[in-house]
Amino acid sequence: MMISARHKLNISLATKDFKVFYGGNSLLVKQKTNNRSYSRIGVVVSRKNSSLAVGRNEMKRLVYRFFEENKSFLEKFSPPSDFIVIILTTAPHINDNKESLIKELKNVISI
């Protein structure tokens, strides 16, 4: 199960005026209100985090899957917002730090 396409934010179209929503050891979440009727989320994983595209895509899928399972977090914002999740942790493979990433994502939705 993956988050619907309309809830995905195209990172290349995102502007620079996002404010920090959450900062942690493994990730940084930025927020900006949007003029749509729903919230969106985008994920940024640098090549520094994982040199292989497979690893970067695994991290993105993990984050999107987490927010799909916790849709209520995206639905609770009024007005709706755009979120950018920036992965800070460096790991060649997601299994190396999956638990810590999920723990921080749980901290984000508890705000």
Image (cartoon, rainbow, N blue to C red):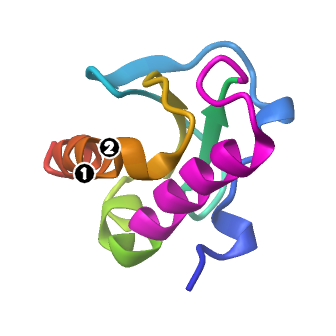
9 and 106: which one is in front?
106
| Residue 21 seen anywhere in this rendered image of the structure | yes
| Magenta span | 47-67
Among all residues in the image, which is located at the extreme right?
12
Number of marks in picture: 2
Front residue of 51/88: it is 51
Image quadrant where residue 61 sits:
bottom right
Residue wearing tag 1: 99
Mark 2 → mark 1, Cα distance in angstroms = 5 Å
| Secondary element at tag 1 | helix
Visible residue check, residue 32? no
Above or below, 111 relative to 18? below
As helix, strand or loop, the secondary structure at mark 2 comes to helix
| Quarter the C terminus occupies | top left
Residue 19 versus residue 26 in the image, above or below: above
Amino acid type indicated by mark 2: Leu
Q: Residues within 10 Å of mark 2 (few under 14, many from 20)?
A: many
Neighbor class of circle 1 (other Cα within 10 Å; few <14, some 14-19, many 20+) is: few
Q: Which residue is mark 2?
A: 101
Asked if the stretch drawn in magenta spans residue 46, the answer is no
Answer with the quarter of the image where residue 101 lies.
top left
Where is residue 88? Give x, y as percent: 46, 21
User: Residue at left 49%, top 31%?
Assistant: 91
Q: Is 54 colored magenta in this rendering?
A: yes
Q: Residue at x 33, y 71 (%)?
A: 70
- Left or right position of 102 against 81: left
**Do tag 2 and tag 1 residues touch (Cβ < 8 Å)?**
yes
Left or right of 11: which side holds 88?
left
Q: Quadrant of the N terminus?
A: bottom right
**In which quadrant of the rendered view does residue 64 lie?**
bottom right
Q: Main secondary structure of the magenta part?
A: helix
